[in-house]
Image (cartoon, helix red, strand yellow):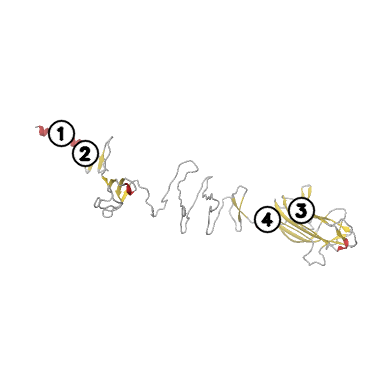
């Protein structure tokens, strides 16, 4: 009778410890999860896997023909680290992989995917943190390669920097480019012939070259009346130049316009001017005269002398050539012209001197150099 009772108790206890339903085995449960072949329930115990000393990542001798997916606890730290490993190969050619292993270097892989294959996002909020970093003491830290796409792309949607290149040694290069460069700056679309320049803060912008952006230049030659213009010895007279050679931008008033023989600055900038005037004394006596020319600027109601050329010449010398060439800063609307004074009687200005080539004559020219 005792044997029967013990048998019944043993069977009941076994049923409590082990529950098996339709191919599911449960330990400490009557209802193992239907998706689990084996479910172990405990609140103060774990599951102890077999401890195996694997000889290598391809060890097929310690466990002959290990099934793919077989899991164990490897005690050989020389494989990289001790821990849980599983067979990621085949029974004949096993490859034991640590479940928490880092990428084994060198690592190479490829796949076709319409979306991103590899993405990381560092959610830290300090500026010095990095999501991805590559470094090499002598080689290339990060390399991008493509055939028709973009090898490396940097993007900033706010006030950040899309791509940062830095060299702190002062000896190397922050950036080196071998090939064509295409720069598109969102503040201004480039046009053919534009040049890359920077503002006072170092921000680059596309700007037309000076020759293209200014479009400001003029030239006039000869003295009106074929040069036979008697000059005053007591006051300055504005010179009237006879022939306009060119007027790019239409900013020069010729002798028939008002104010005559004057350049009117169309914009703020640095301008270059050149004046040359031929003098001749009608008497050619032994007295001196003072051929003088001035380049002057009128802004509003104020006239300022920009430059002056004055000399003392014997009348019997036959003639004299006065020249002024200078750069000056003008504001839009400034008026530039030339005035002259003889400081002597019977002095005339010449269209050109007979004993000089035809191109040596009185002239007035200028152009915008820099905005």
Q: Do the residues bearing badges 1 and 4 touch, measured as CB atoms within 8 Å?
A: no
Q: Do the residues bearing badges 1 and 2 touch, measured as CB atoms within 8 Å?
A: no
- Looking at the picture, how far across and down is residue 282, in whole percent? 88, 62
Q: Measure the alpha-carbon separation of dots 4 and 3.
A: 17 Å
Identify residue for label 2: 19
Q: Nearer the viewer, residue 194 or 346?
A: 346
Whichever of callouts 4 and 3 sits on the residue coming sooner in the sequence is 4
Whichever of callouts 2 and 4 sits on the residue coming sooner in the sequence is 2
- The disc at residue 336 is 3
Tell me if 330 is positioned left or right of 32 in this view: right
Mark 1 falls on what kind of element? Answer: helix
- Looking at the picture, how far across and down is residue 17, in whole percent? 21, 36
Which residue occupies 12% across, 32% down?
5
Inspect this view and state whether residue 295 appears.
Answer: no
Whichever of callouts 3 and 2 sits on the residue coming sooner in the sequence is 2
Mark 2 falls on what kind of element? Answer: strand
Label 3 CA crowd tier, 10 Å (few <14, some 14–19, many 20+): many
Q: Measure the alpha-carbon separation of dots 1 and 4.
A: 108 Å
Whichever of callouts 1 and 2 sits on the residue coming sooner in the sequence is 1
Q: Measure the alpha-carbon separation of dots 1 and 2.
A: 16 Å
Inspect this view and state whether residue 369 appears.
Answer: yes
Tell me if 127 is positioned left or right of 289 in this view: left
Q: Measure the alpha-carbon separation of dots 3 and 2.
A: 108 Å
């Amino acid at each position: 009778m005792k044997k029967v009772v013990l048998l019944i108790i043993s069977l009941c206890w076994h049923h409590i410890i082990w529950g098996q339903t339709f191919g599911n085995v449960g330990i400490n449960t009557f209802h193992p999860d239907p998706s689990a072949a084996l479910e172990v329930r405990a609140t103060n115990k774990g599951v102890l896997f077999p401890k195996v000393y694997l000889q290598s990542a391809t060890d097929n001798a310690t466990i002959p023909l290990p099934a793919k997916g077989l899991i164990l606890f490897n005690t050989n730290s020389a494989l990289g680290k001790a821990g849980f490993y599983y067979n990621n190969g085949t029974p004949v050619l096993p490859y034991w992989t640590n479940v928490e292993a880092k990428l084994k270097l060198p690592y190479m892989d490829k796949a076709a995917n319409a979306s991103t294959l590899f993405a990381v996002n560092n959610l830290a909020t300090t500026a010095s943190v990095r999501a991805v970093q590559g470094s090499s003491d002598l080689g290339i830290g990060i390399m991008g390669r493509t055939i028709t796409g973009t090898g490396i792309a940097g993007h900033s949607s706010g006030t950040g920097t899309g791509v940062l290149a830095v060299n702190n040694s002062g000896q190397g290069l922050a950036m080196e480019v071998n090939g064509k460069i295409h720069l598109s700056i969102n503040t201004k679309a480039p046009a053919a012939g534009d040049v890359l320049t920077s503002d006072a803060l170092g921000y680059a912008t596309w700007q037309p070259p000076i020759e293209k952006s200014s479009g400001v230049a003029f030239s006039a030659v000869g003295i009106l009346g074929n040069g036979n213009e008697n000059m005053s010895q007591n006051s300055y007279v504005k010179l009237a130049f006879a022939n306009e050679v060119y007027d790019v931008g239409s900013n020069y008033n010729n002798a028939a316009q008002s104010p005559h023989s004057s350049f009117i600055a169309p914009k703020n900038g640095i301008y270059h001017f050149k004046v040359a005037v031929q003098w001749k004394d009608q008497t050619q006596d032994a007295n001196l005269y003072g051929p003088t020319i001035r380049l002057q600027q009128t802004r509003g109601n104020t006239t300022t002398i920009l430059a002056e050329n004055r000399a003392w010449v014997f009348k019997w010398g036959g003639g004299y050539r006065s020249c002024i060439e200078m750069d000056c800063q003008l504001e839009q609307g400034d008026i530039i012209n030339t005035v002259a004074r003889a400081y002597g009687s019977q002095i005339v200005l010449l269209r050109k001197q007979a004993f000089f080539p035809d191109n040596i004559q009185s002239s007035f020219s200028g152009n915008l150099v820099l905005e």
